[in-house]
Image (cartoon, grey):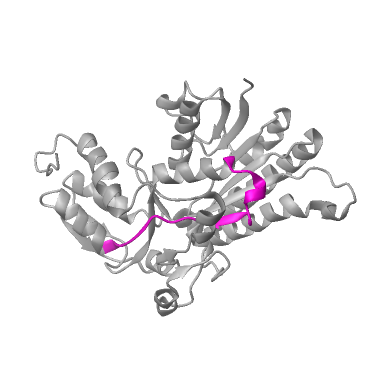
């Protein structure tokens, strides 16, 4: 059987590492990875080739490859993007646009659509006030698309670029015999939590940061208010969603960009889970005005009914399963030397 050639950018990130492992386990893929960093030792036997360096300067090199699927995960995340906005735009927008142009060119040349997966974010939304956020409830894809951050603006614009290159590039859809266009697909993720990689400083990372600190017996000052609520998801569900969306036949899809959701929690609910699992947990709330403002602009909950209807999306991990079967067992194993860790076994 011929292997599918895939490119994974940002392969050393939380999503990237999990995706490489899952594709390798499935088999049938020749995986090419790229990142600013070298691949972790655990992934080096899974990638056929790793190209280290700045993605924007490497894209021309990828014209020598014939990728069937591109998973474009590389990005400058929300907190960092607010500090270095020009650099974030270069990475998030210019890098995405150049890869889309590559995929468009290869789709036409091979007369076969290159599938292009782009991870978007709840940061693409933006509420003017906290009251508007609380009144909105579950938010659909086309509501409140007014991001407050460079990261969110980049994500929303790149969604539109993907729709353009997939449907309207060069207005080729108007030709009597239009060339083959790329196949763009995107998911707006809630806050993602991995049990096996450390939080990377994202604006939604206060939950996992809190639990990692508690597991080590360290005090933690949470940078948002205790009543702050957004949606979250276990990393295995995120990978499941990516692979499901990429595999579904195009004719089943009614749009390019989909919400998905699993469970919604307040920061105080994270604190209570940490206190219940780890003796002596010390968590305080010391909101950062800048980071609090960012999280307050994001939805409390996402409406993922279109994903459920179009491609059968359904998470495996609700709140209880996330903590009891996925995250806390991993914390027990990682920090097993702590005698004060409560056992659920």
Q: Quadrant of the N terminus?
A: top right
Residue 322 pos. (x, y %): 30, 48
Say which residue appears at 40% left-offset and 44% top-offset.
Answer: 235
Q: Is residue 84 visible?
A: no
Quadrant in the picture for residue 269: bottom left
Give the camera-side residue of 309 and 186.
309
Determine if the magenta segment contains residue 261.
yes
Q: Quadrant of the C terminus?
A: top left
Q: Is residue 222 visible?
A: yes
Q: Is residue 85 above or below residue 42?
A: below
Say which residue appears at 78% left-offset and 33% top-offset.
Answer: 110
Residue 304 pos. (x, y %): 48, 59
Q: Which residues are magenta?
A: 247-267
Say which residue appears at 36% left-offset and 53% top-offset.
Answer: 205
Quadrant in the picture for residue 246: top right
Say which residue appears at 45% left-offset and 46% top-offset.
Answer: 238
Give the camera-side residue of 320 and 31.
320
Residue 72 pos. (x, y %): 58, 42
Q: Is residue 16 above or below residue 65?
A: below
Give the camera-side residue of 243 and 86.
243
């Amino acid at each position: 059987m011929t292997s599918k050639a895939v490119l994974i950018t940002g392969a050393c990130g939380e999503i990237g590492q999990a995706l490489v492992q899952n594709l390798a386990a499935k088999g049938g893929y020749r995986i090419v990875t790229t990142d600013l960093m070298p691949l972790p030792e655990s992934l080096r036997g899974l990638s056929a080739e790793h190209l280290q360096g700045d993605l924007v300067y490497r894209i021309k090199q990828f014209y020598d490859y014939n990728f069937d699927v591109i998973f474009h995960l590389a990005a400058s995340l929300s907190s960092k993007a607010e500090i270095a906005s020009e650099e974030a735009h270069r990475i998030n927008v210019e890098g995405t646009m150049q890869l889309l142009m590559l995929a468009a060119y290869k789709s036409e040349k091979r007369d076969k659509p290159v599938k292009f997966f782009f991870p978007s974010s709840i940061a693409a939304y933006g509420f003017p006030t906290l009251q508007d956020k609380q009144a909105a409830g579950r938010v659909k894809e086309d509501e409140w698309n007014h991001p407050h951050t460079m990261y969110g603006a980049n994500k929303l614009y790149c969604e539109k670029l993907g729709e353009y290159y997939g449907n309207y590039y060069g207005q080729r859809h108007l030709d009597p015999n239009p060339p083959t266009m790329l196949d763009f697909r995107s998911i707006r993720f809630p806050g993602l939590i991995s049990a096996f990689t450390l939080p990377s400083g994202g604006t939604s990372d206060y939950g996992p940061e809190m639990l990692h600190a508690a597991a080590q017996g360290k005090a933690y000052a949470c940078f948002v208010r205790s009543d702050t609520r957004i949606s979250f998801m276990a990393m295995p569900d995120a990978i499941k969603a990516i692979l499901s969306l990429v595999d579904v036949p195009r004719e089943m899809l009614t749009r390019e960009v989909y919400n998905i959701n699993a469970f919604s929690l307040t920061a105080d609910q994270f604190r209570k889970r940490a206190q219940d699992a780890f003796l002596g947990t010390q968590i305080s709330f010391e909101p950062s005005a800048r980071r609090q403002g960012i999280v307050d602009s994001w939805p409390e909950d996402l409406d993922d009914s279109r994903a459920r209807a179009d491609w059968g999306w359904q998470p495996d991990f609700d709140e209880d399963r996330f903590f009891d079967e996925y995250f806390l067992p991993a914390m027990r194993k990682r920090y097993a030397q702590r005698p004060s860790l409560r056992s659920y076994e």
